[in-house]
Image: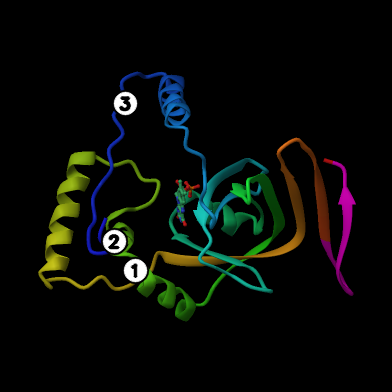
Amino acid sequence: MSQLSSRLAYIDVQDRNPLTLFKEWHNEVISAKCFFFQTNVMCLATSTKNGKISNRNVVVKQYDENGFVFVTDGRSRKSEEIEENPWVAATFLWNYKKDETEYLKQVRMEGKIQKISQDRCLKLFNQEKLYCKIRSHLCHQDQQVDWEVLKSKHDKLLDDVLNNKRKLTMPDHYVGYEIIPERYDFYSAGGNYIADRVVFTKEQSGWNFVHVAA
Ligand SMILES: Cc1cc2nc3c(=O)[nH]c(=O)nc-3n(C[C@H](O)[C@H](O)[C@H](O)COP(=O)(O)O)c2cc1C
């Protein structure tokens, strides 16, 4: 897909039972023999102040000594939960082959999360592909939608943008968060190896690490 295109996906639900859709998707993955390989995706867990947990995948846009950054809709469920409770956990999963050896790696992290500055957010927004910018204007994340209405709004917006009738500036609800890890857990396995794990914890004096059983 070109950088300048944008379309809406549609999930065709044939049964009220969610397990039917789960099996359909699961079977398709099995028959496609594909494997998950999203290098920058982490599964992020947040919780309400009462300890009700939810998780979802997000794309890590940047990371450095300080933390791991992703962007989202400030009106979403995750953002509400982050406002209630800044403690989060995230997991990366990587399964790949290198020099004929299979590797299975997991990195878990736990820490506090904080919003990034508007300036930093704007830089990330400007780097987004067209369909992501359109989504940020079109979609109020987590709100119920009428697909046909959304589609016609989308097509109109895309048309306006492509004909220079409208500029896609960064909306106020486009927000970025940075996880500041206080604990990491690295897991490494693959082939017939029993996994090893290394846990890093942040102390006053700096990072400490120990091996732990898999
Ligand atoms: C591979 C993948 C990457 C995703 N990346 C993001 C992301 O960077 N930001 C985001 O808001 N949602 C992202 N999503 C959608 C979220 O998983 C989730 O559906 C959405 O953010 C709503 O989550 P919430 O209801 O917990 O707030 C991604 C989904 C997938 C499958």
Residue 82 appears left or right of 24:
right
- Which residue is labeled 1 in the image? 171
Image position, residue 111 (x, y; %)? 71, 60
Q: Earlier in the sequence, mark 1 or mark 2?
A: 2
Disc 1 vs disc 2: Cβ atoms closer than 8 Å?
yes
- Residue for point 45% across, 22% down: 23
Front residue (pair 18, 95): 95
Can the viewer see residue 142?
A: yes
Front residue (pair 164, 169): 164
Q: Residues within 10 Å of mark 1 (few under 14, many from 20)?
A: few
Report which quarter residue 15 is drawn in.
top left
Residue 143 appears left or right of 8:
right
* Residue type at the position of mark 1: Pro
Q: Mark 3 and mark 2: span between their CA atoms?
A: 26 Å
Taking the view exactly as shown, the residue that stands out farthest to the front is 99
* Residue type at the position of mark 3: Val
Q: Quadrant of the C terminus?
A: top right
**Relative height, residue 156 to residue 96 (above, below):** below
Label 3 element class: loop
Q: Which mark is residue 13?
A: 3
Residues rendered magenta in the picture: 201-213
Report which quarter residue 159 is drawn in.
bottom left
- Residue for point 42% across, 77% down: 123
Viewer-nearest of discs 3 and 2: 3
Label 2 element class: helix
Image position, residue 144 (x, y; %)? 33, 41
Query: Residue 105 in magenta?
Result: no
Front residue (pair 186, 148): 186
Image position, residue 180 (x, y; %)? 68, 66
Residue 189 appears left or right of 123:
right
- Which residue is labeled 2 in the image? 137
Q: Earlier in the sequence, mark 3 or mark 2?
A: 3
